[in-house]
Structures are given as C-alpha cells and as structure tokens.
Amino acid sequence: MDFLIDAELSNSTILGLAAASFVIWYVVTAFTAWYRLRHLPGPTLAKFSFLWQAHTIVTQQVSSRYINLREYGPLVVVAPGTVVTNDPDVLREISAARSTYKRSFWYAGAKFTHDTDSMGTQVDTAAHDILKAKTAGPYAGRETEGGLERAVDAQLVRLVDLIRRKYLSTPNELRSIDFAKLSRCFTMDVISGLVFGKPWGHLDEGEDVLGWIGTMDKLLPMMSVGLELPALRDIMIPKYGLLRWFGPKTSDRSGLGVVMKHVNETIRERFQNKDKPTKDMMGGFIRNGMTRSECEGEAILAVLAGNDTTASTIRSSMLYLMATPHAYARFKKEIKEAVEQGKVSSPITNEEAQKLPYTQAVMYETFRIGNAVTFGHYKVVPRGGDTLAGYYLPGGTNIGHNTLGLTHNKKIFGEDADIFRPERFLDCRADQKTGMMRALEIIWGGGRWTCAGKNVALIELNKTAFELMRHFDFQVVNVHNPVKERAYISKLHDDMFVRISEADWSCI
C-alpha cells in the first residue's frame, strides 16, 4: 500500500514539475519575445503570444484586422518575433537582388508532402535559385507552343462558349451561375493547359473535375493556421513529422491526393517518354534537368498559385464593376469604342489591352483592392539586425508582407483607399501614379523572390474582364449578399451568383 501511495505521489510530483516547467518556459520565452520588439507598435496580445494571429484566422477577421493595422504605422508586431509591413519601400529593400534577407521557415509550412520541395516551399536560397533558373524559361512561356497568350486565349474562347451553352439568361429564363466557381474553372484550365499541354477539362461543363476547388476550400483554413504557428510547423514538416503519416497520399480516394495522383501519373508518363518532347511547361522542366520529384512539386505549386489567386482577382473585378455603376458604364463604353474603331482583336491581345486607359485602370484597381493575397511571405532579418522605416529589428526577426495594409494605405492611394475607384489611376499627377504602380509591383515580390507566374497572371487580368464584358452583361442575383468571402493567407469566395445575358449595346 505504501508503495502505491509513493507511486501516486511520485506521479503527481512529476506532473506538477512538468506543468511548472512549462509555465516557466512560456513566461521566459514570451517575455524575451516581447522585450526584443518592445519598441514596436502592435496589438498587446500579439507581442507575447501567437493567439492574436490564430484567433484572427480562425474567426475570419483577417481582412478587417490587417487593414486596420495601418493605424499602428509601417511596422507592426503580429506575433512573437514576427513583424509585418505595409511600406512598399521596406518590402523592396528586403527583397532586393543583393539583399541578405533569407526566407523564413514559414514557406516550408506550405509543403503538401514531407519529401517534396518547390520554389514556393524551398527555404535554402541557393537551392531556390537553382530551381528558379530551371523553371524561368517555362514560366516565361518560352517552352509553350504559341506562348502564354495563345494558351490564355484558347481558354477564354472556351469560357465564352460554356457561358453561351449553359449559363446564358434571357428575359423569360434566369440561369444564375456561381461566378466564383466559374472563374476557378477558367484559371484551372489555363494553368493546367500551360503546365501539361492539355487542360484538365473544367470548362467542358463547368465542373470541378478533380475536386481541387472543394479540396482547397477545406485545406486553406488549416494551411493558414499551420503556416502562422511555428509549433505546428515543427511537428508537421520534419522528415518524420505528422505530414509524412497523415498528409495527402496518391492512394486517397478524395481530396488533394486525387490531384497529386493525376499529376504524378502524368509526369511519370512524361519521364518514360523523354524521347517525345512536348512544348509545354512540364516539357521545359524536364529538358532543363529537373528531377521527377522536382517536377511533381513544381506542378502542384503552379496549380495552387496559378489558380485560386488569379481567379479571386478576376471575380473581384466583375463584382466591383457590377457594384459600381459609373465604372461599369465607362468600361463598357471603352470596350464598345475599341471594337467599333478596330483597335482590338478577338480575343483582345495583351498589347492592345495595355493601350486602353480605362481597361488598365480597372485592372490595376482590381489588383489593388481585390487582390487575393492578404499577408505572410516572411523573410528573416540578418544576424546583427537592421533598421527599417526608422525601427531597429534584431537579427532573427521575421518580417513579412501586410498586403491588405499596403493596398489600403491611404498615404499611397488616397483617403478613399477602401473603395473601388479606377479613376485614381487616371485623375492623378504622374508622380502619384508612379508611386501607386510601384507599390502594387512589389506585391509580386522582388529580385529572386519575384512570383514566377506573374506574366501569365497579368495576361489573364488584362484580357478576361474585357472579353467577358465584350460578349455579355452581368448582374448580381443576390443584392443583399452578393458573395461570401473568407480571408486567410489568401481569399476564398463562394455563392457569387450572377445573371449573364448577351451584351446589349443599345444603351451604351
């Protein structure tokens, strides 16, 4: 009996000591994190705990909170040892070609499998640069039959055809369509066509063929929390971490594993037929010496980065135009005049779109206020520290983008930065426009960290709204709740139901 009592006391003592040790550890680390950045502004809770960030994501307050961080100034603490900035000059400095800032392990948190890296998840700068060199040509369209623009045009034609076949409304029949889903079908077929030479078929009938859309709707919230919490990354990402055992697998019958299986099988066939080169991005990856594993990782990255983010901006452009009558009418007028005067082809070329002032204003304003990216993309302050925007940051501090804060920065975009007004890019001084354009440019990253898919995304943004408004008229179906938006590390949209009819030019 005494033995049992001693054992119970011993167990209780061990548990008590463990609990006390944890409390002491937490207090010491929290105090240290607060002390290192005590001179910087930010939410009080964020200075010593990750709870502020986790709560912001879980309660879907990313948009409001990160926009309102502008009230604190250019540098704001959002978590222990973590700062975000809405200052484009700071972002340019840390992303410059000769910058000694390196990626933080935040990027590794975006891995889908424990043993596969891509340009988007590679933390080692040298390894990233090697991948960048191998993928630069394919991403620029030099390996694609007809180039990037021809590939986008092919899917634009299919998109217009799909709308006419299935979703066109008449005065006697309403066929409402969720444009959020339709836009993702379009960008998915654009990027899959570019990567593999043949689109996956989402625009055949407007369906989520491989389940990617539904999968990302479920995965993005969890991924966002995992990216922001180092403790979760530490148990998920290592070689024998949870991702190895519980992550997506090609044997899965649903979810991301289904997409991975399709991608991996396609790549396996390509490697088995190296003697039959193809003119697409994957063919370029293989010709440039990428391994099968590297191709698999890069293909998933291209689909992830090239689909949802671009689709979000496209549907935002249509939503803001429908919600802003003067912008809708002015855009329609420019389209009509351009077509009647023979200034544009069918589909419009990227070069032609760049010569239309209001088309460009709409595109840049949509990219500004409707951009899918919210925050993140942290770099690490080099050893010895650095001074940015007048604040000293100790070495090892993570500093990232507050993209929402940047695109709503009133010092750059004016006091009405929270509303959609394309005219801000037209009715301004030359130096003001240059400042706004430079601020938006850094959202793509800088130097070696510039987004590889920038060129194709800009082509899509330049063309899509123009072609859709050229052929059709759009109207929101549910005016009281036009769209359901959820913001995590990027934005997701659902239930954006619209009425689409043949364009009526009689009133323009």
Image (spheres, rainbow, N blue to C red):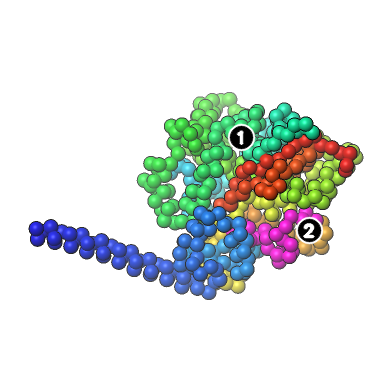
Locate residue 25, reporting x and y percent. Answer: 35, 66
Q: Which residue is mark 2?
A: 424
Q: Quadrant of the N terminus?
A: bottom left
Residue 488 point in image, percent of width and height? 56, 52
Q: Residue at x 83, y 47 (%)?
A: 329
Categorize mark 2 by other alpha carbons within 10 Å: few (<14), some (14-19), many (20+).
many
Which residue range is magenta in the image?
401-423
* Rendering quarter of residue 347: top right
**Residue at mark 1:** 192
Q: Residue extending furthest left?
A: 1
One can see residue 354 in this view: yes
* Amino acid identity at mark 2: Arg
Nearer the observer, disc 1 or disc 2?
2
Task: Identify the residue shown where x is 39% and y is 46%.
Answer: 242
What kind of residue is marked 1?
Ser
> Decide: marks 1, 2 in contact (CB < 8 A)?
no
Which residue is pictured at 42% across the width and 48% down the height?
237
First-in-chain label (1 vs 2): 1
